[in-house]
Amino acid sequence: MTSVAGVAGVPATAGGFVLPGELRATMRRHAAGVAVITTRDKGPVGFCATSLTSVSLEPPTVSFGVAMGSTSGRAWRGAAYGIVHLLGSDQADVAAAFSVTGPEKFAGPVGWRWGPGGQPLLDGVLAWMLVSTRTRLVVGDHLLIVADVRETAIEPGPGAGPLVHCDGRFLGLP
């Protein structure tokens, strides 16, 4: 068991924090919903996120984290708008496509079009939200985006459940 440095029986770690690998191993035990978050830079940009959080209902606000050094992180440093896509249980291939680096994300199994606000809108998702950036905060190696929800749509579909991520795998819920 790893805990706060200085607690009896727990070894201290660098700077009083757990090591990155320890946090990763711990967070692998936490199941989280899977979203793909897109914006527009010179072209479409997107990434797979499990950090999406509902922050407030009034005003409607969400937050998510994006790696600073990634293409999406660089785009979100100045992005005013983007679209948050909630993936369905049958979209592990889409999540996998947006989990890797490279421009191929918008090819292969991913259908998309330019949507509201001129943002990349993925086809066949459970629901989506057009968001506008309210606040950007650098937290370690990530950029935390707090965004106001401007428009939402729940897509009609076969009634699939959500896609979740747990222990390094994508799992579909009924």
Image: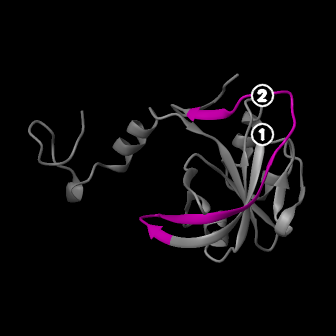
Q: Position of residue 13 (x, y in %)?
A: 21, 50
**Label 2 is placed on what type of residue?**
Ala
Mark 1 neighbour class, 10 Å CA radius: few under 14, some 14 to 19, many 20 or more: many
**C-alpha distance separating marks 2 and 1:** 8 Å
Q: Where is residue 65 in the image (x, y as percent from the top left)?
A: 54, 58
Q: Which of marks 2 and 1 is nearer the N terminus?
A: 1
List the residue tagged with mark 1.
126
Instruction: Point out the residue furthest to the front here.
Output: 58
Instruction: Point out the residue furthest to the bottom here.
Output: 78
* Tag 2 and tag 1, C-beta contact below 8 Å: yes
Q: Is 135 on the left or on the right of 97, as rendered?
A: left
Quadrant in the rendering for residue 169: top right
At x 52% / y 64%, what residue is drawn? 144
For the N terminus, which image quadrant? top left
Kindly state the secondary structure of the residue where label 2 is placed: loop
Q: In this view, does 172 lie above or below 61?
A: above
Q: Is residue 47 magenta?
A: no
Q: Where is residue 122 in the image (x, y as percent from the top left)?
A: 83, 50
**Label 1 is placed on what type of residue?**
Leu
Q: Is 108 on the left or on the right of 34, as rendered?
A: right
Give the residues drawn in magenta, as a range.
137-165
At x 62% / y 34%, what residue is drawn? 164
Q: Is 152 on the left or on the right of 9, as rendered?
A: right
List the residue tagged with mark 2.
160
| Observer-nearest of 11 and 91 | 91
> Of helix, strand and loop, which mostly describes the magenta segment?
strand
Q: Position of residue 68 (x, y in %)?
A: 54, 67
For the C terminus, which image quadrant? top right
